Image (tube, rainbow, N blue to C red):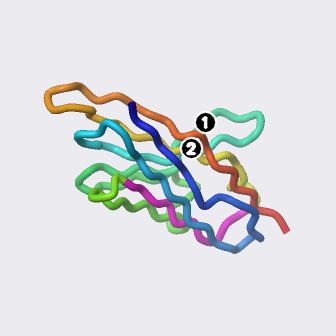
Amino acid sequence: QVQLVESGGGLVQPGGSLRLSCAASGSIFRINTMGWYRQAPGRQRELVAAITSESTTNYAESVKGRFTISRDNAKNTAYLQMNSLKSEDTAVYYCNADVQRRRFYGYTGYWGQGTQVTVSS
């Protein structure tokens, strides 16, 4: 199986920064896209940022210029550096990865358990 473990969430004041990490482990041959999603109370889960294995990135308009996604392919780990945080960034942040478990297998999407980010004074 494949496990994704997020870390780095917490409580931060408006204007502050946090860095989230997502480590994938288990039966992994290759990982294609890794992404960060978030879900606030009463709202649908939304894409925050994504990065391909070639490091092509994609961001939600609401976080462009403030958040940076990166990855370390050797460690099967993705990061989300969040700067200039706003109250509206408060949500549970989830990691997602498209994983190929063995050569010639297809890709399957996996989710982490989520980490809470709260932006409040």
Identify which amino acid the numbered label 2 is placed on: Tyr
Residue occupying the point 55% across, 51% down: 6
The residue lying at 56 percent from left, 66 percent from top is 19
Q: Which residues are magenta?
A: 77-86
User: Split into 4 quadrants, where in the image is the C terminus?
Assistant: bottom right
Q: Is residue 37 left or right of residue 89?
A: left
Tell me where residue 98 appears, x and y as whole percent.
35, 37
Left or right: where does residue 70 sit relative to residue 117?
left
User: Per the image, is 16 magenta?
Assistant: no
Q: Residues within 10 Å of mark 2 (few under 14, many from 20)?
A: many
If the image is split into quadrants, where does the N terminus sit?
Answer: top left
User: Is 107 left or right of 37, judged from the image as shown?
Assistant: left
In terms of image quadrants, where is residue 108? top left
Relative placement, left or right, of 50 versus 112 is: left
Q: CA distance from mark 2 to mark 1?
A: 9 Å
SS at mark 2 in the image: strand
Which mark is drawn over residue 94? Answer: 2
Q: Can you tell which mark lies on residue 45?
A: 1
Above or below, comparing residue 121 to residue 4 in the picture: below
Amino acid type indicated by mark 1 = Arg
Q: Residue at x 45, y 39 (%)?
A: 3
**Nearer the observer, 81 or 65:** 81
Magenta part mainly helix, strand or loop?
A: strand
Q: Residue at position x 42%, y 56% from top?
A: 78
Q: Residue furthest right?
A: 121
Seen in the picture, residue 4 relative to 90 is either above or below; the reply is above
- Which mark sits nearer the N-terminus, 2 or 1? 1
Residue 92 placement (x, y as % from top left): 67, 46
Residue 58 x %, y % = 40, 52
Pick the front one: 98 or 60? 98
Label pair 2/1, CB-CB below 8 angstroms: yes
